[in-house]
Amino acid sequence: MSKIKTMEINTSLIDAINYRRSVRIYDETKEIDAEIVKKCIDQATLSPSSSNMQLWEFHHIVSSKILNQLSIACLDQSAAKTAKQLVVIVVRKDLWKQRTKANAAYLKNSFGNKPESEYSSREQFALNYYQKLLPFIYADFLGIFGAIKYIIGWVIGLFKPSYRQLSNADMRIVAHKSAGLAAQTFMLSMAAKNYDTCPMEGIDTLRIKKILNLPTSSEINMVISCGIRKPEGVYGDRFRIPFESVYKQW
Ligand SMILES: Cc1cc2nc3c(=O)[nH]c(=O)nc-3n(C[C@H](O)[C@H](O)[C@H](O)COP(=O)(O)O)c2cc1C
């Protein structure tokens, strides 16, 4: 089996965007380098995330045993069955306390670890954001606090512009949005190395969580299969709705 050496191929962002296609059949004779895939995951962590909370995990599957189990949980899709490796993007909204603490610690360190009384108002505002505002936004109990916060946001919104994404469902969307951006950064990084991917949400998320031993509070954002395309693995030309019908200039 040939090991594709693609480290030296560096295409531009536009080339990577054009190269990326959802590949449903990978070439079984062509291996991909786990180190390159890992580097692309590292690139994905540079994606923006809501309040820099980084409520994500990237599970990189190289073990053939787990690949087999996951391909069944991916409903036997050929994009999973023929893949050489898989990346499962997991949303960890439950890690919000750790992430707010990490952000606050980072800020304190960058402010020079001085006593709180010496913080400038800008520094105090930034710290309050992670130590007070985000805990208020993320804290929930069975969706009850979320519903109350949603109503509070709605009432305030009657009088002035107000942040409204406060219900439990809203917060899930917030976390999944950021994970989706990371997924795209990963796929473009792969494309820049002429490695192929297919994002999948046609999957059994409960089974995937069990296979990866993930906590119930985690959520699967998507599974991304990886490999080198077979020509017939790209199903036809790209179809896109005419640009004029989706582009609105104001
Ligand atoms: C969130 C998401 C979920 C997707 N799920 C699947 C899937 O389960 N199986 C599949 O074959 N393709 C899946 N796709 C791929 C889309 O069908 C594909 O992106 C679309 O047809 C456009 O083709 P292109 O990616 O080659 O440009 C998914 C794409 C996204 C963004």
Image (cartoon, rainbow, N blue to C red):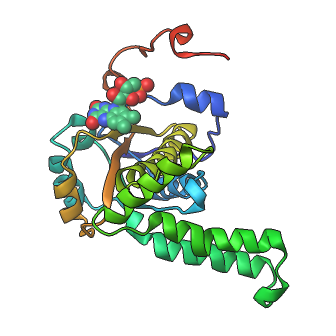
Picture coordinates of residue 80, whole percent (x, y): 25, 42
Q: Residue at x 37, y 67 (%)?
A: 140
> Is 71 rendered above or below residue 215?
above
**Is residue 24 in view?**
no
Picture coordinates of residue 154, whole percent (x, y): 48, 47
Q: Which quadrant is the C terminus positioned in?
A: top right
Q: Residue at x 55, y 25 (%)?
A: 18
> Is 199 rendered above or below residue 67?
above
Q: Quadrant of ligand 1?
A: top left
Q: Residue at x 31, y 54 (%)?
A: 220
Q: Residue at x 66, y 16 (%)?
A: 249
Depth order, front residue of 164/34? 164
Picture coordinates of residue 216, whole percent (x, y): 24, 67
> Is 85 rendered above or below residue 108?
above
Picture coordinates of residue 34, whole percent (x, y): 44, 57
Depth order, front residue of 118/229? 118
Depth order, front residue of 64/107? 107
Q: How many marks?
A: 0
Q: Is residue 145 left or right of residue 109?
A: left
**Is residue 194 in view?**
yes
Q: Residue furthest bottom?
A: 115
> Is 25 rendered above or below residue 239?
below
Depth order, front residue of 92/38? 92
